[in-house]
Image (cartoon, rainbow, N blue to C red):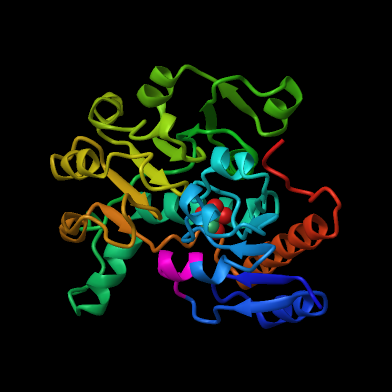
Amino acid sequence: MKPKILVCRAVFPEVIEHLAAQFDVDYNDRDAPLPPAELAARLADKVGALTLLSDRIDAATLAAAPALKAVCNVAVGHNNFDLAAITAAGVMATNTPGVLNDTTADTAWALILASARRIVGADKWVRAGQWQGWKFHDDWLGTDVHHATLGILGMGRIGQAVARRAAGFEMRVIYHNRHPLPAADEQACKANWVSKEELLREADFLVLLLPYSPAVHHIVGAAELAAMKPTAHLINVARGGIVDDGALIDALQGRRIAGAAMDVFENEPALDPRFLGLDNVVLTPHIGSSTRATRLAMARLAADNLIAALQGRRPPNLLNP
Ligand code: DGY
């Protein structure tokens, strides 16, 4: 008899086929999360699970899954895991770092440019038939990205990929992390460590790339937004909850910063409706890693982690000690 696993949400048929060669796969083939009670019920007899960021795995879920040996997230972020509870239950947890760095960095750049050059609003305006003719001092004057200062809060693998792309725009790149990068990595992405205060004060474009944990909840709130330049743009491609969305809406309404581009939100997909009335924010539906190639690579890597864990090998992306 093959070991039983749960794939919690629709991924790709080729990944299911790969897993089905060695496991008895219970597959939720809808691209929607299982309600928590159904998730717990379907995990009851499983030894492994391929989870998505919408699947909360905590002490309550684990209590309902006594045979579980591994939970493998198809995401680099893993704030849907209560890692302490998972570790205490003797279950392995994995994520998918690396394979989405470039795609997510590209998304950050798409949002930087869209916010600076007001691309989304201009597109809507043209479609609404409001374009009466070319103007010199037009309604769509934007902000230059080239030669500006790019600030990155959270300089991990994705932050460094964002920084490397800034060279083409001849930007000055500054970043803040708890610890500066090794000198060779700083040189590779031509970035300098600064204090968080300096980062907020100096950045023309502030890109957030921190992993979420309660320690960074609302790390960008009213005080931080007030410390930014009134001409600055804030870009969040990390996780909802890092920014205090209410404080951001106030800052955008009061034009205390020039613009924002948000790919992630507190309580997504139920974003604060006041966002929808703002003309200085670009809103996207958590698409940071969303290309076919990258999502497939993430699903394959998660499957590899699950196979290794259930074959008694150390999974390549083990999160718990
Ligand atoms: C991640 O991997 O954490 C992204 O947010 C989802 O692709």
203 lies above or below 318: above
Is residue 169 found left or right of 102 in the rendered image? left
Is residue 238 found left or right of 44 in the rendered image? left
Residue 269 drawn at (x, y percent)? 33, 62
Residue 243 drawn at (x, y percent)? 33, 40
Residue 276 drawn at (x, y percent)? 20, 61
230 lies above or below 289: above
Nearer the observer, 211 or 146: 211
Nearer the observer, 278 or 315: 315
> Does residue 169 show up?
no
> Does residue 37 show up?
yes
Q: Report the image quarter containing ligand 1.
A: bottom right
Residue 317 drawn at (x, y percent)? 73, 48
- At 61% from the left and 39% from the top, the residue drawn is 88
Tell me the quarter of the picture where residue 227 sits: top left
- At 19% from the left and 35% from the top, the residue drawn is 256
Residue 37 within the segment the image draws in magenta: yes
The stretch in magenta equals 32-40
Q: Quadrant of the N terminus?
A: bottom right
261 lies above or below 321: below
